[in-house]
Amino acid sequence: MRLCHVHDIPDGGARGFDTAGAGQDTLFVVRRGEQLAAYVNSCPHHDTPLAWRRDAYLNAAGDRIVCAAHGALFEIDTGRCTLGPCLGDALTPLSLRTDPDGEVFLAPQQDSETTP
């Protein structure tokens, strides 16, 4: 499934996607240069969406993913919670594929992974 072009996600920022047509973002992608990380938009603490407003998935410093409901902080590269009520838990990662033209696609997920 095509999500966007890599440059549609601001460098050092994030963007959510409603791939299930649910009316809210079911996944989000964080971009650092040409590196992308994608996760299911659900805090492991209570399965609440992470962003406090559209595409607001990062803390003010832009170095951690933050849950707006609980204040939990997550590493961008691993999704591991480093602060908050779900300490040690992790966000559910998703696989992406980027073609040579910079188009970003949600890669087919393994059976054990959650598909949004």
Image (cartoon, helix red, strand yellow):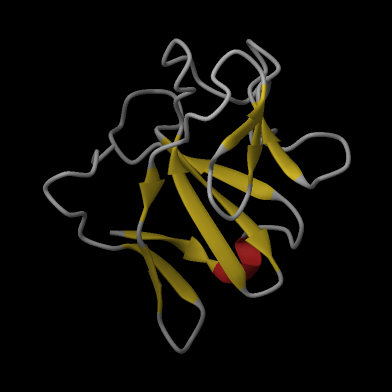
Image position of 22 with respect to 103: above or below: above
Task: Tell which of 108 and 91 is nearer to you.
Answer: 91
Q: Is residue 59 above or below residue 85?
A: below
User: Who's the residue at 30% across and 31% down the image?
Assistant: 21
Q: Quadrant of the image for the C terminus?
A: top left
The front one of 67 and 87 is 87
Q: Position of residue 48 (x, y in %)?
A: 48, 14
Give the residue at the far front of this rendering.
Answer: 88
Q: Quadrant of the N terminus?
A: bottom left
Q: Is residue 85 above or below residue 19?
A: above
Q: Would residue 15 appear left or right of 17 to someone viewing this image?
A: right
User: Image quarter for residue 12?
Assistant: bottom right
Residue 54 lies in quadrant? top right
Which one is nearer the viewer's eye here, 79 or 101? 79
Furthest toward the bottom, the residue is 100
Among all residues in the image, which is located at the extreme right?
A: 61
Q: Quadrant of residue 80?
A: top right
